[in-house]
Amino acid sequence: MPDLLRSVVRLVRRGVVFELRLCRSLFRWVARRTHGLAPGVEPFGYARAVTPQG
C-alpha cells in the first residue's frame, strides 16, 4: 500500500507542477502583449498570411 500511495502522490505532484508552469507561461505571454506600446507604433502579429516567393 505505501508504494501505491507514493505513486499517487508523485502523479498528483507532477500534475500540479505542470499546471503551475502552464499558468506561468500564459502569464508571461499575456504580459508581453502589445498593451504597452507607445502612441503611433504599429504592433506586428505572431502569424500572418504570406504570398509565396517565386
Image (spheres, rainbow, N blue to C red):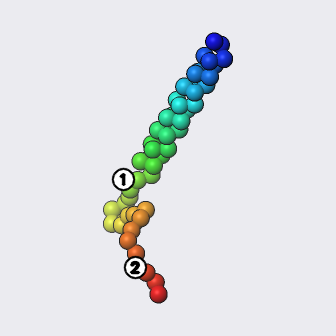
Left or right position of 10 against 34: right
Classify 10 Å Cα crowding around label 1: few (below 14), some (14-19), many (20 and above): few
**Residue at 33% across / 66% down in the picture?**
40
Q: Say which amino acid is labelled 2.
A: Thr
Q: Say which amino acid is labelled 1.
A: His
Asked whether the residues under the numbered discs 2 and 1 touch, taking CB atoms below 8 Å apart as contact, a structural biologist would say no
Percent coordinates x, y for residue 3 in the rendering? 66, 17
Q: Is residue 46 above or below residue 30?
A: below
Q: Is residue 18 above or below residue 26?
A: above
Dot 2: element: loop
Left or right position of 54 against 3: left
| Residue occupied by mark 1 | 35
- Which label sits in the foreground, 2 or 1? 2
CA distance for labels 2 and 1: 29 Å
Classify 10 Å Cα crowding around label 2: few (below 14), some (14-19), many (20 and above): few
Q: Quadrant of the N terminus?
A: top right
3 or 28: nearer the eye?
3
Residue extending farthest to the bottom is 54
**Residue at 45% across / 42% down in the picture?**
27
Percent coordinates x, y for residue 20 in the rendering? 51, 34
**Residue at 49% across / 44% down in the picture?**
25
Q: On the image, which quarter does residue 38 sit in? A: bottom left
39 or 47: nearer the eye?
47
Q: Is residue 29 above or below residue 40?
A: above
| Residue occupied by mark 2 | 51
Left or right position of 42 against 23: left
**Residue at 57% across / 31% down in the picture?**
14
Residue extending farthest to the right is 3
Dot 1: element: helix
Count of marks overlaid on the render: 2
Percent coordinates x, y for residue 5 in the rendering? 60, 16
